[in-house]
Image (cartoon, helix red, strand yellow):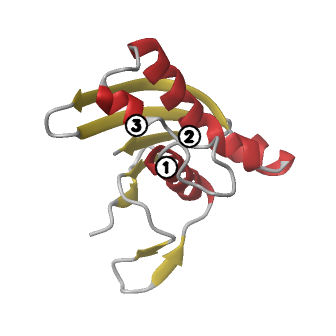
Amino acid sequence: MISFGLSKNDTVYSNHINDLIMQPNGQLQVLTGAYSIAQSINCALSLWLGEYELNSTEGVPYKLIFQGSANPQLIDYQLTNAILSPNKYMSKEQFELFGIKKINSLTYSLDRQTRKFNLDAVVLLNNGQDIIVSI
């Protein structure tokens, strides 16, 4: 099940990557605005460093993270860069409305035994809207 939705206080929740969402009335909706930014952040966090052949510098170095050879500061830096990466691909008009202004919170946990990585972030957009992203 896809889990996107606006809360009463205009917070976008995202924990699934999709281009479309199903409305309660059965109609499909293309993701736009804050929804598309949440999707872009999820995509950036899901990309392993070197996985994208057209730009091998994009992605998070999960291999280093799971091997234990990355220090916490490097992990924070790489995750922050991934979360902010949608800003690089926006027009000036898009950035004014939906650019990522700052990361209000970023927490993650890592279990190297089970190779399980969880992340929760709250991101503030330039229009004042919060996005909550969970992977």
Label 3 and label 1: CA atoms lie apart by 9 Å
Quarter of the rendering occupied by the C terminus: top left
Tag 3's secondary structure?
A: helix
Label 2 and label 3: CA atoms lie apart by 29 Å
Residue, disc 2: 129
Q: Position of residue 43 (x, y in %)?
A: 50, 53
In terms of depth relative to the viewer, which is nearer, 84 or 65? 65
Q: Position of residue 9 (x, y in %)?
A: 43, 43
Q: Compared with residue 10, is residue 65 higher up or lower down, i.e. above or below?
A: above
Whether residue 125 appears in this view of the structure is no
For this orientation, the residue located farthest to the left is 113
Tag 2's secondary structure?
A: loop
Label 2 and label 1: CA atoms lie apart by 25 Å
Q: Residues within 10 Å of mark 3 (few under 14, many from 20)?
A: many
Image point (68%, 50%), residue name = 55
Residue, disc 1: 47
Sequence-first tag of 2 and 3: 3
Tag 1's secondary structure?
A: loop
7 to the left or right of 32: left
Image point (40%, 37%), residue name = 62
65 to the left or right of 11: left
For this orientation, the residue located farthest to the right is 92
Q: Compared with residue 132, is residue 16 higher up or lower down, i.e. above or below?
A: below
Sequence-first tag of 2 and 1: 1
Residue contact at pointers 3 and 1, CB within 8 angstroms? no
Residue, disc 3: 62
In terms of depth relative to the viewer, which is nearer, 39 or 35? 39
Whether residue 111 appears in this view of the structure is yes
